[in-house]
Amino acid sequence: MSENKRGGKREGAGRKSKSEEVQMIERLSPLEPKAFKALEKGVEEGDFKFVQMFYNYYAGKPKETKDISITSEQPLFDL
């Protein structure tokens, strides 16, 4: 390994190839009914995290807004 401290290619870094993504989806597909049942049960019980997850995927995550108010004049820099 070279002593170059400027970064570069690293083994295992970056996005996985499409074939690896497809393999993972194929491995997870049999669990889909169980995952849906767990989500359904959580929503029926009124568990906030399950309801939040459902609506984040169903309607999309709401846009975050920030209320910024300045109550007094303050200099940006000390001179």
Image (cartoon, rainbow, N blue to C red):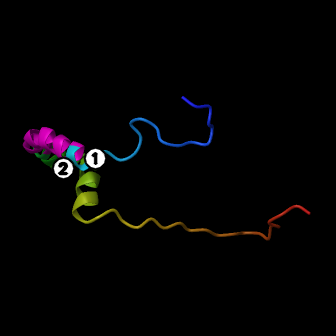
Q: In this view, does 15 lie to the left or right of 24?
A: right
Q: What residue do we see at 18% from left, 50% from top?
A: 43
Residue beneath disc 1: 17
On the picture, is 13 further left or further right than 1?
A: left
Residue 78 x %, y %: 88, 61
Residue 48 position, x and y percent, is 28, 49
Indicate which disc, 1 or 2, sits on the residue closer to the N terminus.
Answer: 1
Q: Taking 61 as reference, is 41 above or below it?
A: above
Percent position of residue 4, x then y: 62, 36
30 inside magenta stretch: yes
User: Which residue occupies the foreground of this view, 66 or 79?
Assistant: 79
- Give the crowd class for mark 1: few <14, some 14-19, many >=20 residues within 10 Å: few
- CA gap, disc 1 and disc 2: 34 Å
The C terminus lies in quadrant: bottom right
Q: Residue at x 72, y 69 (%)?
A: 71
Q: What element carries label 1?
A: loop
**Residue 20 picture quarter:** top left
Question: Mainly helix, strand or loop, the magenta region?
Answer: helix
Look at the image and say whether residue 57 sits in the magenta stretch.
no
Provide the residue span drawn in magenta: 20-35
Q: How far across and down, in percent of the image, does residue 74 sit?
A: 80, 67
Q: Name the residue under label 2.
A: 43
Q: Residue at x 25, y 66 (%)?
A: 59
